[in-house]
């Protein structure tokens, strides 16, 4: 990335911090990446993870990008994140390694460039949970506290998160170059991104069209995965949408409990723009913004370029729906396709909505063959539905065991529930007690295990948390 035009980034150095202390290292990720765990835990390693020391050969940068925030276009950029460099794993995969919360950059605007412990641990927990659920995502390598006290409504421990992603190239990166840079540089960015994320088409004459098509496909796949586990990103601004198709920028995200498409947790999303049920439509809107930036590369003739964009973006809904239905079929233990499947799925969801059933636990109970444990147990309509569902299951060749296995693989026994996440963060940030978080991380690291320990974590809070609010903590 540092070989690209200098307008794409700024050279920066992470801020020095007074007393870095490692509070969490992702040892399995570190070993997967071929990194030396002991070295990362040593003083030198902690200095690197806190930004106090720059690894040999690294040329840290902050990346420039723009974005539509809640619909309004603005210049942004890494205001509190610094890209330390790229890392190639023993398997030959390339990742960006980034520090979040490591001081101001030319894009910090009025911000302090810092981060605090609670939100950084939150990103750690949720991103690792998403990975374990099998959803494309950036990951968290470690969290250090800095020894600083940072003001966010109250004073809180300063922290730096090290996160890794296939890249940090966003829809907003393209928007930035499109809005303020040259057409030539847009081509440079597109070619670079294609080489990095979709190299098989790099030499195709139609590569920009194929790239757009693939980006739409990946986004449709990603959002369907979110919807199938009840994940709400919370801030689907175009600057938070990665071209790689990974989930990035965990802020006020959370998992839905009761099935309610209007669910919003983020304190800043006052109009519910990024509500659970809006996520597919918003993804399509974001992809339209992305496609617009490619117009000049797609065709010299403006009208033809517009037509191409329109055709491609309009495919999103059907690609999304196909992914979603096939995921829902798996959740219900269905291997083959039947035309009545969609209405079978919809009628279950409608009952879940009407009777305020917990999303995860309803599918968990069906998986365990315990429909009486759902909130729908006394609903007569539900019993009819169960009969229909069982008949439907019989109209396929697979055995009962195979059906159970498919359902187990497709319905998490446990998600990081809001009250559990909050308890873990509070203990860590207020009492320096990391044991609750460690236990939570262990339980959510194998969400499809259906272990005994997980039963406890499947329980709902004693008082329902429909008033639950999440904050960006920025
Ligand atoms: P986010 O909502 O985390 O995606 O952030 C939106 C924009 O605000 C990005 O450009 C961030 O880098 C920037 N930002 C968020 N928090 C801070 C902060 N404390 N200091 C500087 N910039 C920030
Ligand atoms: Mg962001």
Image (cartoon, rainbow, N blue to C red):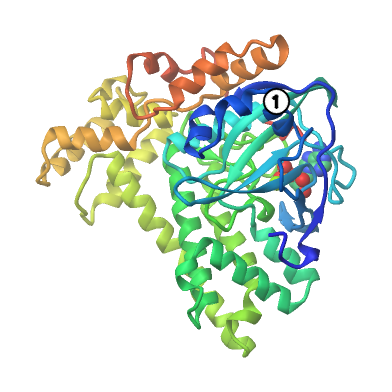
Q: As drawn, which residue projects farthest toward the front?
A: 56
Rendered location of residue 220, percent (x, y): 47, 56
Q: As drawn, which residue projects farthest toward the bottom?
A: 301
* Quadrant assignment, res 268: top right
Give the answer, above or below, for where 191 lies relative to 226: below
**Residue placed most toward the observer, 393 or 56:** 56
Is 225 on the left-hand or right-hand side of 175? Answer: left
Image quarter in which the C terminus is found: top right
For label 1, the SS is strand
Give the answer, above or below, for where 328 lies relative to 28: below
Rendered location of residue 451, percent (x, y): 33, 19
* Quadrant assignment, res 23: top right
Rendered location of residue 314, percent (x, y): 49, 69
Give the crowd class for mark 1: few <14, some 14-19, many >=20 residues within 10 Å: many
Q: How many marks?
A: 1
Rendered location of residue 373, percent (x, y): 31, 20
Visible residue check, residue 469: no
**Residue placed most toward the observer, 276 or 340:** 276
* Quadrant assignment, res 81: top right
Q: Residue at x 69, y 11 (%)?
A: 432
Is 353 on the left-hand or right-hand side of 195? Answer: left
**Residue placed most toward the observer, 92 or 14:** 92
Q: Residue at x 55, y 46 (%)?
A: 247
Visible residue check, residue 289: yes
Q: Residue at x 61, y 14 (%)?
A: 434
* Residue labelled with disc 1: 144
In the image, the residue with mark 1 has its CB under 8 Å from the nearest atom of ligand 1: no
Image quarter in which the N terminus is found: bottom right
Is 396 on the left-hand or right-hand side of 445? Answer: left
């Amino acid at each position: 990335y540092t070989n690209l035009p200098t307008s794409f980034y700024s050279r920066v150095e992470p801020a020095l911090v007074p007393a870095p202390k490692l509070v969490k290292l992702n040892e399995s990720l570190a070993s997967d990446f071929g990194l030396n765990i002991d070295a990362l835990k040593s003083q030198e390693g902690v200095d690197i993870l806190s930004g106090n020391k720059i690894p040999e050969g690294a040329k840290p940068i902050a990346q420039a990008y723009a974005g539509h925030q809640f619909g309004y276009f603005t210049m942004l950029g890494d205001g509190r994140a610094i890209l330390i460099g790229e890392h190639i794993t023993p398997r030959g995969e390339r990742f960006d390694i980034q520090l979040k919360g490591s001081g101001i950059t030319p894009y910090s605007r009025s911000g302090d460039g810092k981060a605090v412990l609670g939100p950084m641990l939150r990103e750690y927990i949720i991103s690792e949970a998403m990975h374990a659920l099998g959803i494309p995502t950036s990951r968290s390598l470690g969290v250090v506290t800095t020894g600083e006290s940072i003001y966010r409504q109250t004073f809180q421990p300063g922290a730096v998160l090290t996160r890794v992603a296939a890249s940090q190239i966003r829809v907003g990166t393209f928007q930035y170059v499109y809005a303020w840079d040259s057409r030539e540089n847009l081509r440079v960015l597109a070619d670079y991104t294609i080489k990095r994320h979709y190299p098989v088409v790099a030499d195709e004459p139609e590569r920009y069209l194929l790239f757009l098509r693939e980006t739409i496909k990946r986004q449709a796949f990603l959002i369907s995965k979110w919807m199938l586990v009840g994940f709400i990103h919370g801030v689907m601004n175009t600057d938070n949408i990665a071209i790689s198709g990974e989930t990035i920028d965990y802020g006020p995200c959370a998992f839905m409990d009761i099935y309610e498409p209007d669910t919003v947790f983020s304190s800043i999303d006052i109009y519910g723009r990024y509500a659970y049920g809006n996520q597919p439509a918003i993804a399509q809107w974001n992809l339209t913004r992305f496609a617009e930036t490619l117009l000049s590369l797609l065709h010299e003739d403006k009208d033809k370029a517009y037509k191409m964009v329109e055709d491609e973006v309009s495919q999103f809904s059907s690609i999304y729906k196909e992914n979603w239905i096939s995921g829902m079929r798996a959740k219900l233990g269905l291997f083959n396709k039947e035309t009545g499947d969609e209405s079978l799925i919809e009628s279950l969801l409608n009952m879940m909505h009407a009777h305020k059933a917990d999303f995860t636990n309803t599918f968990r109970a069906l998986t365990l063959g315990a429909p009486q444990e759902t909130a729908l147990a006394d609903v007569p309509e539900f019993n009819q539905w169960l009969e229909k569902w069982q008949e439907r299951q019989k109209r396929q060749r697979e055995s009962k065991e195979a059906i159970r296995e498919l359902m187990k693989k497709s319905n998490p026994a446990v998600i990081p529930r809001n009250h559990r996440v909050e308890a873990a963060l509070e203990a860590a940030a207020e009492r320096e007690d990391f044991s609750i978080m460690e236990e939570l991380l262990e339980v959510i690291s194998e969400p499809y295990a259906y272990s005994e320990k997980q039963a406890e974590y499947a329980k709902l809070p004693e008082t329902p948390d429909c008033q639950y609010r999440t904050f960006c903590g920025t």
